[in-house]
Amino acid sequence: MSRKKRPASPGTGADTESMIRVDHAGEYGAVRIYEGQLAVLRRRPGAAASVATIEHMAQQEQAHLKAFDALVNERRVRPTALEPVWRIAGFALGAVTAAMGEKAAYACTAAVEEVIDEHYAGQIAQLGDSDPALTQTVEKFRAEEIEHRDTALENGAEQAPGYRLLSETIKAGCRMAIRLSERI
């Protein structure tokens, strides 16, 4: 019988590796969600304003991913083995919500970013003063994720058909993806 590994203590190298792994996976997933949304919305007449807004958010997510790519390489962190799953799932989530309409695409963004805000806040608290460079990166990205959530809400996320169910389902999926990516 194998023993279950104990979680790393806050501030340890193993714990920091888990943070970088999951954040890298999350930023990759966000890039894929926006790619899926844009693939659909660029073909939708009258969606030019939403396309421009989502392209701006996608560019920021791409910068986040690039930063975590660098951290993965610099600190020799093993990326999640679930990357192929997140590649497909992220794009599909973005495409499906965009196919439901612009407000559903924004509902997806608001739900994802709400979970990421909570996740990053927890990481910042856990890091404390142990890794100032990582803390600064996470704080900057958290502010941009909050901006994305607020932008989505301002653009009618809560007016999407079945908003509450859609939002709660996406949030549950994000929380599950976080837990899995921390470990796998």
Image (cartoon, rainbow, N blue to C red):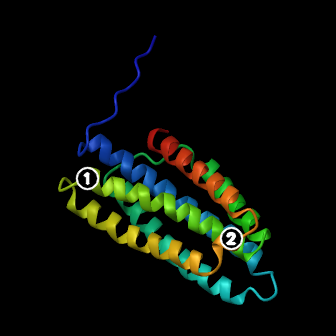
Q: Residue furthest top?
A: 1
Q: Decide if residue 48 is in sight here.
A: yes
Name the secondary structure under disc 1.
helix
How many marks are shown on the rendered structure? 2
156, above or below 77, in the image: below
Q: Which amino acid does label 1 sit on?
A: Leu
Q: Which residue is drawn at 67% across and 89% down?
A: 49
Query: What residue did someone put label 1 on?
Result: 127
Residue 42 is situated, as x and y percent measured from the top left of the image, at: 75, 81
Residue at horizontal 44%, vertical 43%? 182
Q: What residue type is labelled 2?
A: Ala
Name the spot of residue 105 as percent of width and height, x first.
Answer: 68, 70
> For residue 67, which quarter of the picture?
bottom left
Where 109 sits versus 17, above or below? below
Q: Which of 108 and 41 is in front in this view?
A: 108
Mark 1 vs 2, N-terminal side: 2
Q: Name the residue under label 2.
A: 105
Q: In which quarter of the image is residue 82?
A: top right
Label 1 packing within 10 angstroms: few (<14), some (14-19), many (20+): some
For the point 60% across and 84% down, the residue is 53
Residue at 24% from the left image edge and 63% from the top image edge:
133
Q: Is mark 2 on a helix, strand or loop?
A: helix
Assess disc 2: are there few (<14), some (14-19) or many (≥20) residues with their C-alpha within 10 Å of its C-alpha: many
